[in-house]
């Protein structure tokens, strides 16, 4: 079993930045590929970014490239999502997810464990 906890969400003005963090416990962190998804009310949960087990491979939703950066620190058992130039349409609950199989993936069903989510609200 893997337990994921996200933190770092909050209210920010458009153009601002936030860094989300995700801590994992219960399994060797370095054996997990990690991803971030987001879900706004009334919408489907959508892929944001993913990072491979070792951190050497990253993958982003096309619409977010250049503004969001995913990273990880295996020694600290942490994954991060740096979000810059935030827009009101980035408002959503952001979820950290872990995948026990290797490789990055953008499909929700490919992930085995999920955090409870952290709210990000971007005001205009």
Image (cartoon, rainbow, N blue to C red):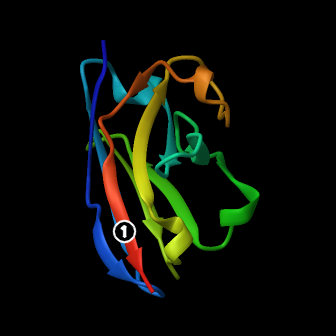
The foreground one among 35 and 55 is 35
Q: Position of residue 78 (x, y in %)?
A: 32, 45
Q: Residue at x 66, y 73 (%)?
A: 66
Q: Residue at x 45, y 85 (%)?
A: 14
Q: Which quadrant is the N terminus positioned in?
A: top left
Number of numbered labels in the structure image: 1
Which secondary structure, mark 1?
strand
Q: Which quadrant is the C terminus positioned in?
A: bottom left
Q: Is residue 110 above or below residue 24?
A: above
Q: Residue furthest front?
A: 42
How packed mark 1 is, by other alpha carbons closer than 10 Å (few <14, some 14-19, many 20 or more), is many
Quarter occupied by residue 89: bottom right
The foreground one among 119 and 74 is 119
Q: Residue at x 52, y 66 (%)?
A: 90
Q: Residue furthest top?
A: 1
Quarter occupied by residue 43: top right
Q: Is residue 48 above or below residue 110?
A: below
- Judge left or right: residue 35 versus residue 106: left
The foreground one among 52 and 46 is 46
- Judge left or right: residue 40 versus residue 22: right
Q: Position of residue 70 (x, y in %)?
A: 51, 56
Q: Residue at x 52, y 33 (%)?
A: 53
Residue at which label 1 appears = 121
Quarter occupied by residue 102: top right
Q: Position of residue 52 (x, y in %)?
A: 58, 37
Q: Position of residue 75 (x, y in %)?
A: 29, 41
Q: Residue furthest right?
A: 62
């Amino acid at each position: 079993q893997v337990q994921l906890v996200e933190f770092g969400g909050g209210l920010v003005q458009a153009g601002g930045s936030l860094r989300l963090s995700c801590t994992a416990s219960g399994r060797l962190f370095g054996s997990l590929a990690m991803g971030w998804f987001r879900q706004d009310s009334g919408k489907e949960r959508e892929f944001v970014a993913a990072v491979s087990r070792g951190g050497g491979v990253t993958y982003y939703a096309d619409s977010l490239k250049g503004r969001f950066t995913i990273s990880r620190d295996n020694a600290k058992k942490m994954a991060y999502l740096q979000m810059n130039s935030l827009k009101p349409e980035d408002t959503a609950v952001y979820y950290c997810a872990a995948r026990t199989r290797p490789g990055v993936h953008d499909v929700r069903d490919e992930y085995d464990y999920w955090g409870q989510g952290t709210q990000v609200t971007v005001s205009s």
